[in-house]
């Protein structure tokens, strides 16, 4: 609430309102509220008591009751110098309750009485924007929050997809490495088998000498048999 507590004029509630104002200035909002309500018991139409009660309730974030207190003096306050502040504060209360139509109407009344109030102009523009968004289905801040929530959800989904893709890439790489290792092992096994089937030069030389020895033995045997046959024929044929 921008305006200060109002001074009092009615004799019946003056003492209670002034006591409430002292507590109000000290920041004792609840105690101030009690004093203003005492004054309203004596005069329920008191502009000062209702106006200042709204201020104490506003600071306690009891916006609903604050609005009711200001609405009580809405007609009579127009006739006082405090009317621009009263309508301005009513607009503030309405904004807290997101009652944008009441906020726009209240700020407009304040500006009609005090056109040079820059804060009232700024608040009126904001309330009007929120009201237009609400009528257009935008939902004002709620819509912005929904859009932000949707964006956050999309970002989370994208992050999850990226993580899944990275895991898949890592798995594929591991599979490729394993396949390569298996292929290398197969080639090594084949090479070992081939090497086992080969004979060394020394073994080849030994085998050749063995073959040559067998051939020599065979040839010697054949020659002996021929010699024996020749001797036999010579005995049988007596010249």
Image (spheres, helix red, strand yellow):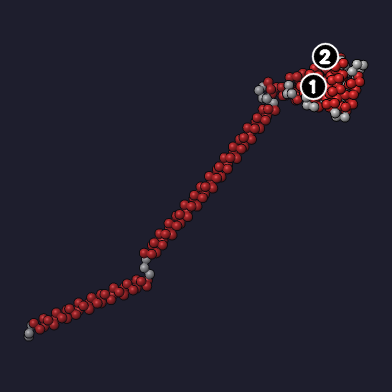
Near-viewer residue (4 or 107): 4
Residue of label 1: 66
151 or 67, nearer to the observer: 67
Give the residue displayed 60% in from the left and 40% down from the top: 159
Residue drawn 83% across the image and 22% down it: 53
Q: Is residue 84 left or right of residue 220?
A: right
Taking the spot 61% from the left edge, 35% from the top edge, the residue there is 154
**Residue 1, numbered label:** none
Which percent across, then down, holds residue 81? Answer: 88, 18
Give residue 162's quadrant in the image: top right
Horizontal and vertical percent for residue 67? 78, 20
Is the C-beta separation of discs 1 and 2 under 8 Å?
no
User: In the shown orientation, is residue 197 left or right of residue 4?
Assistant: left
- Whether residue 186 is visible here, answered yes or no, is yes
Q: Secondary structure at mark 1?
A: helix
Percent of width and height locating residue 40: 85, 17
On-image quarter of the N terminus: top right
Residue 116 visible here: no
| In the image, residue 177 above or below residue 133 | below
Of circles 1 and 2, the one toward us is 1
Instruction: Say which residue label 2 marks.
Output: 75
User: Residue visible at 58% across and 43% down?
Assistant: 163
Q: How many marks?
A: 2
Mark 2 crowd level (few <14, some 14–19, many ≥20, 10 Å Cα): few
Horizontal relation, residue 183 to residue 82: left or right: left
The image quarter containing residue 238 is bottom left
């Amino acid at each position: 609430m921008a305006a200060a507590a109002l001074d009092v004029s009615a004799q019946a509630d003056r003492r209670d309102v002034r006591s409430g104002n002292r507590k109000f200035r000290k920041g004792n909002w609840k105690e101030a509220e009690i004093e203003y309500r005492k004054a309203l018991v004596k005069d329920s139409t008191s502009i000062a008591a209702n106006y200042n009660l709204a201020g104490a309730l506003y600071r306690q974030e009891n916006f609903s009751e604050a609005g009711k207190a200001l609405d009580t003096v809405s007609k009579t306050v127009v006739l006082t110098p405090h009317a621009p502040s009263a309508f301005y504060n009513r607009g503030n209360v309405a904004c807290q309750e997101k009652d944008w139509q009441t906020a726009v109407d209240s700020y407009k009344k304040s500006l009609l009485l005090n056109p040079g109030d820059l804060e009232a102009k700024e608040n009126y523009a904001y309330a009007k924007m929120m009201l237009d968004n609400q009528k257009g289905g935008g939902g004002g801040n709620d819509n912005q929050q929904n859009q932000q929530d949707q964006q956050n959800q999309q970002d989370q989904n994208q992050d999850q997809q990226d993580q899944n893709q990275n895991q898949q890439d890592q798995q594929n790489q591991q599979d490729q490495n394993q396949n390569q290792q298996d292929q290398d092992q197969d080639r090594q096994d084949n090479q070992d088998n081939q090497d086992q089937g080969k004979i060394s030069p020394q073994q080849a030389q030994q085998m050749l000498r063995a073959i040559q020895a067998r051939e020599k033995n065979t040839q010697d045997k054949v020659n002996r048999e021929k010699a024996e046959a020749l001797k036999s024929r010579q005995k049988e044929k007596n010249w």
